[in-house]
Image: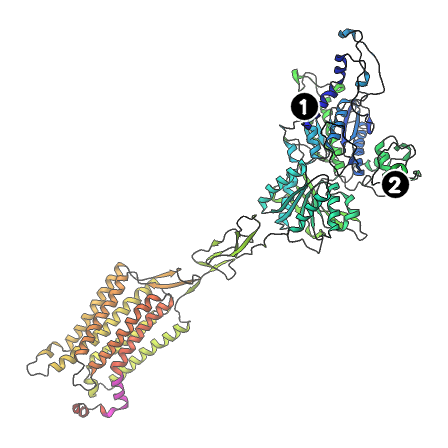
């Protein structure tokens, strides 16, 4: 409704004269108020300007039903500097001989009051001209067929040249309202401070250009900044305006790319009532975030800081949007709260030659030429000029009650943002905006007849510039200003460059705005933000705040999202067994390879420990010693038997088989050594068949001895002729036969699926690779054991039959005991073998071999050795015959 009414008002302004004529009225009445407060200078082309010289903390949205009531405004000397930067640029161009030498530029600058209704009214005066209220004349245009008594009333005509282009406004919301009105008439608007990305929509706002970068770039810079310092939990606030609304929306979208979350987002009204301040400060205090990004201007920031001080809230890290990143006026009252503030400011001009002199050349003698300058002077020096045209009062002080100015006041004696040219940022944008129009006019003047860009290849008339013609050339402008190349993209936006400013306190308490970095949108994304962190002054201490919802997950853990909460709020879960994460805040843990395993911190995969039963292990050493000891004992007994081979006891115990048994018992002990050491394929192929064949030999010898003992007793019967089948040759043949069967089994096993070395990763403790011998064919392995068991059973059975033979030192009895021990060992071996892994399995193998070999050795030969060595008197034929 407001836009409709504004367009209607525009229509009335444009067609006021024709309406008067058609109605046949004697008098045409100007419905608005006479606008005296402006800066105007005539020229061939008059450039319009809108600046927020006044601003109000209270919104003045009009309903267009009644005349708006007067509003109390505050004065901005900073905006006055912007105004005079425009007049300076225009005068500088007029003095140049290389730019528009045959064309004089003029200006018509008005106050927008940072308010949409006021801005619309001022803009309409710019594009229609100031009405000449005091002049009234008649004229008759009979050539055009008008009635005799028809009159033009010059009160409806313009006394000032209309502006085909407007430089303004500062606020995005105001600029948008102006575009919706002026855009219908193709009047270009060049903003020096409106940054809302919404204005980049050329389909919606085709006549808009700006020398201020779009917020889209500022938002990327802000997202990179908070991410750089690890601030993943930030508060985002902004004034209820198009500028803040679009900026916050963009920030929330952009920050997700960097893992940054908003602890809260809060909009507050332009007019900050106490209720609105209470709501805002309650949100800030309840949040755990100490970093606050504020999209507002300095007027709203003043109200917020007053309440922050009242509540004694300290240790806040303020991040300023470009609209107040260099607003020095905030420092005087709130410097203690703003120390350490960071903010991106638009590109600064080191110096605009001559601007300082232009600003400070104001004197009381010529100041009453403008109400703007008069108001500034009286506000700055708190005095009253003689014959002042100022009718504003601020801060509750009636300007009429001030003392008269002495006339000796000098701008050099006091500080004012007006004369401060150390931070020429917006002023520089204004300067470039004027030059944009000037270069567009220059390109227009260079048009050759018949080669123009318009209908029928015509050129524009410089003495009657049309707005739509001017915007055509402005879109294509490419020039340099103070050594900087100025060009625009397809959206009418300049290439973004920001200085990162840090608010620092000097020893004397004054503000020092220090450039601590920059953001250049023309460089690749990874290098666009450059920071010098060492020179930053922080609100508290010497390092940045930590502002996170959850503390970062260290390497060795991963992020576990909390259901229903922002992505920045999470728990840290240690990586599972066999997985690592070597980065902070890892989303997933990665699994180590088959040959590596996590270290204790689970942040690095290290080679697995290779394990096998070696000669360096205590267990390996013990088993090795026992194996060698068993072989030595066997060979020692063999030596004793060989030494006493002629004695009755040795001769009576089948000497040849005893010698053979002792030899293979020694071999059995030495077989245990094959199971110690790093396995290899060839060693595994030897281990099991050597083991199987050696035991088959031993038990075959035992079986032969048992049969011989048994048959020897049976052969004492008169009719027995059995011993002829159990002579030495037959004994050797039976041992050989018993062994050959095992050899055949082992041979088939080796041909089909032989044992081999294997790296076992699937153990309970997966940090270890166990190099082990696997049997290959389980059938082959159990056949070897089964055959040994068969021989042992036969041996046990024969010993059982011969247990009651009337034989001195009954050998059959000892063979039976040895077989019982053998069975006990190997029956126990089976469950232990199945339930152990790694080198312990190998140890079980060796233990079973040694235990069974020692059982045979001691059961059969220990009693005989005892008699031979310790009781030799019993080793006699007489003693044996007595038995």
Disc 1/disc 2 C-alpha distance (Å) = 44 Å
Q: Which mark is residue 290?
A: none
x and y percentages locating residue 578 in the rendered image? 46, 58
**Residue count near mark 1 (Cα–Cα under 10 Å), binned few <14, some 14–19, many ≥20:** few
Instruction: Residue 310: tell me if it is visible.
Output: yes
Secondary structure beneath disc 2? Answer: helix
Most distant residue in the front direction:
66
Q: Nearer the viewer, residue 258 or 385?
A: 385
Query: Residue 353 vs residue 475: left or right?
Result: right
Query: Residue 819 vs residue 446: left or right?
Result: left
Q: Nearer the viewer, residue 325 or 125?
A: 125
**Residue count near mark 2 (Cα–Cα under 10 Å), binned few <14, some 14–19, many ≥20:** some
Q: Nearer the viewer, residue 716 or 818?
A: 818
x and y percentages locating residue 391 in the rendered image? 85, 33
The residue that label 2 is drawn on is 381
Query: Residue 163 vs residue 729: left or right?
Result: right
Q: Quadrant of residue 682?
A: bottom left
Secondary structure beneath disc 1? Answer: helix
- Quarter of the image with the C terminus in it: bottom left
Q: Nearer the viewer, residue 597 or 270?
A: 270
Most distant residue in the left direction:
719
Magenta span: 862-873
Q: Which mark is residue 184?
A: 1
x and y percentages locating residue 351 in the rendered image? 78, 39
Q: Is residue 872 magenta?
A: yes
Name the chief secondary structure element in magenta.
helix
């Amino acid at each position: 409704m407001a836009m409709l009414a504004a367009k209607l008002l525009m229509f009335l302004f444009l067609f006021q004269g024709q309406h008067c004529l058609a109605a046949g009225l004697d008098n045409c009445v100007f419905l608005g108020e006479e606008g005296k407060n402006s800066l105007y200078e005539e020229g061939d082309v008059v450039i319009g300007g809108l600046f927020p010289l006044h601003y109000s903390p209270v919104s003045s949205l009009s309903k267009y039903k009644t005349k708006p009531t007067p509003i109390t405004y505050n004065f901005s000397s900073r905006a006055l500097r912007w105004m005079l930067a425009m007049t300076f640029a225009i005068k500088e161009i007029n003095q140049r001989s290389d730019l528009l030498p045959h064309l004089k530029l003029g200006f018509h600058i008005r106050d927008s009051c940072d308010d949409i209704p006021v801005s619309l009214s001022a803009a309409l005066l710019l594009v229609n001209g100031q009405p000449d209220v005091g002049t009234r004349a008649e004229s008759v245009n009979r050539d055009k067929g008008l009635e005799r008594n028809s009159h033009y009333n010059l009160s409806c005509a313009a006394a000032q040249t209309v502006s085909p282009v407007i430089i303004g406004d500062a606020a995005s919301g105001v600029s948008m309202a102006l575009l919706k009105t002026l855009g219908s008439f193709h009047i270009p608007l060049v903003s020096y401070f409106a940054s809302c990305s919404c204005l980049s929509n050329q389909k919606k706002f085709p006549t808009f250009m700006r020398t201020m970068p779009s917020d889209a770039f500022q938002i990327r810079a802000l997202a990179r900044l908070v991410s750089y310092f690890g601030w993943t939990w930030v508060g985002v606030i902004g004034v209820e305006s198009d500028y803040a609304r679009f900026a916050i929306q963009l920030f929330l979208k952009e920050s997700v790319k960097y893992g940054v979350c908003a602890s809260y987002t809060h909009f507050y009204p332009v007019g900050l009532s106490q209720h609105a301040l209470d709501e805002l400060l309650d949100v800030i205090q309840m949040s755990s975030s100490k970093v606050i990004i504020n999209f507002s201007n300095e007027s709203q920031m003043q109200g917020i800081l007053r309440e922050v001080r009242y509540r004694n809230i300290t240790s806040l890290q303020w991040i300023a949007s470009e609209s107040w990143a260099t607003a020095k006026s905030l420092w005087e009252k709130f410097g203690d709260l703003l120390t350490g503030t960071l903010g991106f400011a638009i590109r600064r001009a080191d110096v605009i030659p001559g601007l300082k002199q232009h600003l400070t050349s104001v004197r009381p003698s010529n100041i009453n030429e403008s109400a703007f300058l008069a108001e500034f002077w009286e506000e700055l020096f708190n005095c009253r000029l003689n014959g002042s045209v100022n009718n504003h009062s601020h801060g509750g002080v009636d300007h009429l009650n001030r003392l008269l100015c002495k006339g000796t006041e000098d701008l050099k004696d006091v500080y004012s943002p007006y004369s401060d040219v150390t931070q020429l940022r917006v002023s520089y944008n204004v300067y470039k905006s004027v030059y944009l129009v000037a270069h567009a006019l220059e390109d227009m003047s260079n048009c050759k007849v018949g080669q123009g860009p318009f209908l029928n290849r015509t050129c524009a008339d410089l003495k009657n510039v049309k707005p739509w013609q001017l915007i055509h050339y402005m879109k294509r402008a490419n020039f340099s200003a103070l050594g900087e190349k100025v060009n625009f993209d397809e959206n009418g936006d300049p290439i973004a460059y920001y200085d990162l400013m840090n608010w620092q306190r000097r020893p004397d308490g004054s503000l020092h705005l220090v450039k601590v970095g920059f953001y250049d949108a023309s460089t690749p994304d990874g290098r666009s933000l450059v920071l010098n962190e060492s020179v930053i002054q922080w609100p508290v201490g010497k390092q940045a705040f930590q502002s996170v919802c959850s503390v970062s997950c260290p390497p060795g853990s991963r992020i576990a999202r909390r259901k229903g909460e922002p992505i920045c709020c999470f728990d840290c879960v240690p990586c599972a067994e066999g997985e690592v994460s070597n980065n902070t805040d890892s989303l997933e843990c990665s699994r180590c390879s088959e040959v590596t395993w996590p270290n204790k911190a689970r942040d690095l995969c290290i080679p697995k420990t290779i394990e096998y039963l070696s000669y360096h292990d205590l267990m390996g050493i013990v088993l090795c010693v026992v194996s060698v000891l068993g072989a030595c004992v066997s060979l020692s007994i063999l030596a004793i038997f060989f030494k006493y081979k002629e004695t009755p006891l040795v001769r009576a115990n089948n000497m040849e088989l005893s010698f053979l048994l002792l030899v293979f018992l020694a071999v059995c002990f030495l077989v245990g050594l094959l199971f110690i050491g790093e396995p290899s394929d060839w060693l595994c192929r030897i281990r099991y068949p050597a083991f199987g064949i050696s035991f088959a030999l031993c038990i075959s010898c035992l079986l032969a001895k048992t049969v011989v003992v048994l048959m020897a007793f049976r052969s004492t019967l008169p009719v027995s002729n059995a011993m002829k089948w159990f002579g030495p040759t037959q004994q050797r043949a039976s041992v050989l036969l018993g062994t050959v069967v095992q050899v055949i089994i082992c041979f088939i096993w080796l041909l089909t699926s032989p044992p081999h070395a294997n790296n076992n990763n699937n153990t309970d403790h997966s940090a270890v690779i166990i190099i082990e011998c696997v049997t290959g064919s389980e059938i082959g392995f159990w056949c070897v054991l089964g055959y040994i068991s068969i021989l042992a059973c036969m041996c046990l059975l024969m010993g059982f039959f011969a247990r009651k033979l009337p034989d001195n030192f009954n050998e059959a009895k000892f063979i039976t005991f040895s077989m019982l021990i053998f069975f006990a060992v190997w029956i126990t071996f089976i469950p232990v073998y199945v339930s152990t892994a790694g080198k312990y399995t190998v140890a079980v193998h060796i233990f079973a071999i040694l235990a069974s070999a020692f059982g045979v050795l001691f059961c059969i030969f220990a009693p005989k050795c005892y008699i031979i060595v310790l009781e030799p008197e019993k080793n006699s034929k007489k003693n044996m015959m007595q038995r």
